[in-house]
Image (spheres, rainbow, N blue to C red):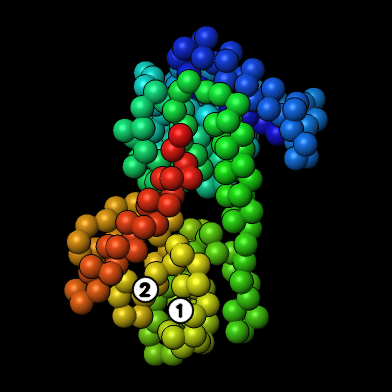
Amino acid sequence: MNIALVDDDITELKHISYMIKKYLSDSANGLSDINSVNIDKFNNGNDFMSQWKTDSYNIIILDIYMDLSGVDIARKIRKTDKNVSIVFCSTSNEFASESYEVCADYYIQKPLNDKNIASMFDRINMQNNNKTQSLTLPDRQKIILHNIIYTEYFNHIVTIHTKQGENIQTRISQNELENILCKYSYFYSCYRGIVVNFHAVIKHNCDTFTMSNGKNIPISRRRKKEVREQYTKFLFEKMRTEVY
């Protein structure tokens, strides 16, 4: 496992590294072999970005307030690396909303302690499991749920828009698709013939969802209140499990 820590406070870098090594050494969850863990420490964002390469780390833990902010670093990373687990670490939770934009896996507040380090790894493990969860379509195509941005139905065909830019088509009714997808709380039909993945929403207003691929998805005028309530519930649950 390769972990990068980026923080302009050298004392914090040492503390975070110590807490992680302590957790992994004491853990009985299969990550206890500390010799297989490599932790690189960077005390400013520009140094990190000058050395970072796509797929070089499993986890990147970013302080928010640096010369190059943690949020800006995460945006650059997500342009080419969709799989690395990104964690924000800060004295404030005011940037929690930005964590959704870059699909961050966790957001913890300093000072770090045994509890929030353990919660971070529990969350990352859960997220990684979710990222591999798949379903089999009626035509036997398999698709990973995490990769779906939104779906749209037209003329008996559903087109599934994915994070890889691939459009997958299958013959299925909209009702059948909703029965399959919407049993997961992060999928929701916000407009006739369209199902969105709330995890892929980067901006929301009363009329539209802006998705991670830049597409603006309309929200049914008749269902605005219901959609808002469901999305707020999703955000609350996400915030509750991520912000400490």
Q: Is residue 196 above or below residue 103?
A: below
Q: Are marks 2 and 1 in contact (CB under 8 Å)?
A: yes
Can residue 78 be seen here? Answer: no
Can residue 34 be seen here? Answer: yes
Please give left or right for residue 158 compared with residue 207 in the image. Answer: right
Please give left or right for residue 25 compared with residue 142 in the image. Answer: right
Residue 208 lies in what quarter of the image?
bottom left
Please name whichever residue, 83 or 122, is drawn nearer the observer in this view of the structure. Answer: 122
- Which residue is depicted at the point 34% across and 60% down? 231
Separation (CA) of disc 2 from disc 1: 7 Å
Disc 2 marks which amino acid?
Ser
Give the mark nearer the N terminus: 2 vs 1.
1
- Which residue is depicted at the point 63% across and 58% down? 132
Q: Is residue 69 above or below residue 127?
A: above
Residue 92's x, y, as percent? 36, 27
In what element is the residue under mark 1?
A: helix
Disc 1 marks which amino acid?
Glu
Residue 152's x, y, as percent? 39, 76
Residue 168's x, y, as percent? 52, 73
Q: Check disc 1 and report the residue beneath it.
A: 178
Disc assigned to residue 189: 2
In what element is the residue under mark 2?
A: strand
Quadrant of the frame with the N terminus: top right
- Which residue is depicted at the point 61% across and 71% down? 135
Q: Residues within 10 Å of mark 1 (few under 14, many from 20)?
A: some
Residue 143 lies in what quarter of the image?
bottom right
Q: Is residue 63 above or below residue 94?
A: above
Disc assigned to residue 76: none
Please name whichever residue, 236 or 46, is drawn nearer the observer in this view of the structure. Answer: 236
Residue 63's x, y, as percent? 44, 24
Q: Is residue 81 above or below residue 186?
A: above
